[in-house]
């Protein structure tokens, strides 16, 4: 399961960013845990000086702005596509396949 963190102290922009992320996760039916990080010291640990910021699996993806739904969709689809498949190192075969929705799985 992906962990998506919204970094922000609770300002209107941070609330908007959380709303966008939640809507996109629900629309795409993505299995993800959404976590709000509001403590300034925790936010600074990500080297973020302007909020809101979006962190996916501990990598800062967006900072200092509210993403559009389209931007968030593209980011999540790309992030999930890059991590959707696996391969067996001992074998040259990939275990990925594509279903009728165009999503890959193992």
Image (cartoon, rainbow, N blue to C red):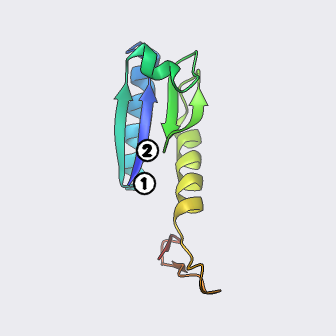
Query: Counting other residues with Cα less than 10 Å from the Cα at mark 2, is it few (<14), some (14-19), or many (20 or more)?
Result: some
Q: Is residue 62 above or below residue 11?
A: below
Circle 2 sits in a helix, a strand or a loop, which is it? helix
Are the residues at dot 2 and dot 1 in contact (C-beta closer than 8 Å)?
Answer: yes
Task: Looking at the picture, tell me which residue is in the foreground, 82 or 57.
Answer: 57
Where in the figure is residue 19, as x and y percent of width and height? 38, 31
Where in the figure is residue 21, as x and y percent of width and height? 43, 38
Say which residue appears at 37% left-offset and 19% top-offset: 38
Q: Is residue 62 above or below residue 106?
A: above
Q: Which label sits on residue 24? A: 2
The residue most toward the right is 92
Q: Which label sits on residue 75? A: none
Q: Is residue 61 left or right of residue 43?
A: right
Where in the figure is residue 66, as x and y percent of width and height? 53, 25
Say which residue appears at 58% left-offset and 23% top-offset: 47
Quarter of the picture containing the N terminus is bottom left
Query: Counting other residues with Cα less than 10 Å from the Cα at mark 1, is it few (<14), some (14-19), or many (20 or more)?
Result: few
Tally the numbered discs: 2
Report the residue marked by disc 1: 28
Where in the figure is residue 45, as x and y percent of width and height? 51, 24
Say which residue appears at 54% left-offset and 78% top-offset: 96
Q: Quadrant of residue 29?
A: bottom left
Q: Calculate the distance from the C-alpha at mark 2 to the C-alpha at mark 1.
A: 6 Å
Circle 1 sits in a helix, a strand or a loop, which is it? helix
Q: Is residue 18 left or right of residue 85?
A: left
Task: Looking at the picture, tell me which residue is in the foreground, 67 or 87.
Answer: 87
């Amino acid at each position: 399961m992906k962990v998506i963190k919204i970094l922000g102290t609770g300002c209107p922009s941070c609330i908007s960013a959380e709303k966008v992320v939640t809507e996109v996760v629900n629309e795409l039916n993505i299995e993800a845990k959404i976590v709000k990080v509001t403590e300034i010291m925790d936010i600074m640990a990500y080297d973020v000086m302007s909020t809101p910021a979006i962190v996916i699996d501990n990598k800062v993806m967006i900072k200092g702005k509210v993403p559009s739904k389209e931007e968030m969709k593209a980011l999540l689809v790309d992030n999930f596509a890059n991590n959707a498949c696996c391969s067996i190192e001992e074998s040259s075969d990939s275990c990925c396949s594509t279903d009728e929705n165009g999503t890959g799985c193992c």
